Image (cartoon, rainbow, N blue to C red):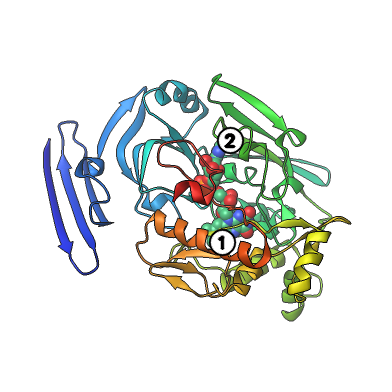
């Protein structure tokens, strides 16, 4: 193997530029160009290599910058892309060769470590079928389909039900995991069932709607089954005619009214959601982020009453007779973090709930900033914010780590 490595130190900014080019006898070559904090990764951890197992291409020391919307220069010990169900079935054997593993879709809801000491399994299964029946249509979609492209396809077919979920990044397979939601609609409103592959038994199992246990930004796949199953595809139910548009979300309703649209159709909602989102949220292609970093706390009404003694202007939305939801962005803003930056990380100026990487931040900087936000909100309101983003441990399959355990 011929190997060339160039390291250039830029003293003042404490970074180094690493350029690696090599050629081996299997005729693969790779160019790695990466900015790192000094001494963060060993040279060996940056060497890229390719091997095959039962036809699956396994890449060693794989740069995940393009696979996480925070844009972190994270490196995985191994990386494999799964395109078919047959390839899924090869995984149990493949995983025995690694210490740990991480299932990854579009990487828009993860905070990756600098080096993940295991195999990253990127889900890329493409599938799209639909079956119309009366006013309804059942759509079968593969886990590797891009979510927004899928929503756009449904709108192009004039199928109604998920137009409010436009422009959410990531893959379709991750959508049930945290029960994605936006502008009054959640994944649970349309999911009929899904097919999941069990890594321990090597078998597929169908989970019906009830078995998915979908709640606010939560499901059985984010709890008991986290990391144990891979979602392969799902069936969702949409309307084919007589659409029931969901305009319960005030900002969406007002936006349509301001545009002078009195009788909106599916496409009006889809386009308005895109326009509202683009005006409020940072584009991950430009500014690294993973959307809302924390969940909105749901608290008993008595707790809200207590907070209101000190903060009479508390913003909240009733869930039922007993509970209210408090916007985490409002809480963070009250603590003075909106538009506040700590080096290369901070809380976005238009939405404090979105933590951003404005340069080449490290995972530890984002974790430290998130922990600071969490502590400040707790000190002011007595509420412990729970991360919505999955914080991935360098060695173990994770996702429900609390901030203090990864600092
Ligand atoms: C700008 C921006 C805006 C966002 N807005 C919203 C929003 O409005 N509403 C919302 O709910 N979310 C939002 N998100 C969060 C994110 O886009 C969604 O949670 C999305 O569904 C994640 O998809 P992904 O493919 O990127 O998942 P990843 O980040 O790749 O994975 C997320 C988790 O799911 C697991 N996983 C992924 N695929 C599979 C699979 N096939 N089988 C089993 N496990 C799997 C991973 O291990 C990980 O734990 C936003 C993110 C960004 C960057």
Q: Name the disc covering residue 226, or none.
A: 2
Is 78 in front, or is 344?
Answer: 344
Q: Which of the image's four quarters has the N terminus?
A: top left
Q: Secondary structure at mark 2?
A: loop
Confirm or deny contact between disc 2 and disc 1 (CB under 8 A): no
Give the residue at the far right of this rendering.
Answer: 321
Image position, residue 222 (x, y; %) = 62, 40
Q: Give the spatial CA distance, label 2 vs label 1.
A: 27 Å
Which mark is drawn over residue 375? 1
Vertical side of 405 occupied by 8: above or below: below
- Name which of mark 2 and mark 1 comes first in the sequence: 2
- Above or below, comparing residue 19 to residue 283 in the picture: above
Neighbours of disc 2 within 10 Å: few (<14), some (14-19), many (20+): some
Q: Residue at x 53, y 43 (%)?
A: 399
Which mark identifies residue 266? none
Mark 1: give few (<14), some (14-19) or many (20+) Cα within 10 Å: some
Instruction: Specify whether tag 1 is near ligand 1 (CB below 8 Å).
Output: no
Q: Is 127 on the left or on the right of 114, as rendered?
A: right
- Residue 322: x and y in percent read 86, 55
Q: Which one is closest to the eye, mark 2 or mark 1?
A: 1
């Amino acid at each position: 193997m011929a190997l060339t490595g160039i390291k250039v130190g830029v003293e003042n900014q404490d970074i180094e530029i690493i350029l690696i080019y090599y050629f081996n006898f299997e005729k693969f070559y790779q160019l790695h160009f990466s900015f790192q904090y000094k001494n963060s990764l060993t040279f060996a951890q940056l060497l890229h290599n390719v091997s095959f197992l039962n036809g699956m291409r396994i890449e060693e020391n794989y740069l995940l910058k393009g696979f996480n919307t925070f844009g972190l220069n994270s490196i995985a010990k191994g990386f494999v892309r799964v395109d078919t169900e047959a390839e899924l079935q090869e995984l149990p054997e493949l995983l025995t060769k690694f210490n740990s593993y991480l299932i990854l879709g579009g990487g828009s809801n993860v905070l990756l470590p600098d080096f993940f000491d295991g195999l990253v399994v990127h889900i890329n299964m493409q599938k799209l079928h639909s079956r119309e029946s009366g006013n309804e249509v059942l759509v079968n979609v593969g886990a590797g389909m891009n979510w927004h492209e899928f929503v756009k396809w449904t709108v192009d077919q004039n199928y109604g039900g998920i137009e409010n979920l436009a422009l959410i990044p990531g893959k379709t397979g991750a959508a049930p995991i945290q029960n994605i939601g936006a502008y009054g609609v959640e994944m649970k409103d349309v999911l009929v069932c899904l097919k999941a592959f069990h890594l321990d038994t090597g078998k597929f199992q169908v989970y019906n709607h009830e078995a998915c246990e979908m709640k606010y930004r939560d499901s059985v796949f984010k709890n008991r089954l986290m990391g144990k199953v891979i979602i392969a595809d799902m069936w969702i139910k949409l309307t084919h005619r007589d659409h029931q548009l969901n305009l319960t979300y005030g900002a969406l309703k007002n936006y349509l009214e301001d545009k002078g649209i009195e009788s909106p159709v599916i496409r009006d909602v889809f386009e308005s959601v895109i326009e509202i989102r683009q005006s409020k949220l940072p584009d991950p292609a430009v500014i690294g982020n993973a959307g809302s970093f924390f969940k909105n706390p749901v608290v008993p009404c008595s707790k809200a009453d207590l907070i209101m003694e000190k903060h009479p202007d508390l913003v909240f939305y009733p869930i039922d007779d007993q509970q209210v939801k408090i916007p985490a962005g409002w809480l963070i803003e009250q603590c003075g973090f909106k538009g506040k930056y700590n080096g290369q990380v901070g809380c976005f100026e238009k939405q404090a709930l979105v933590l951003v990487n404005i340069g080449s931040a490290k995972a530890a900087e984002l974790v430290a900033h998130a922990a600071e936000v969490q502590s400040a909100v707790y000190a002011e309101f007595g509420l412990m914010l729970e991360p919505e983003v999955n914080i991935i441990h360098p060695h173990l399959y994770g996702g429900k780590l609390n901030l203090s355990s990864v600092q």
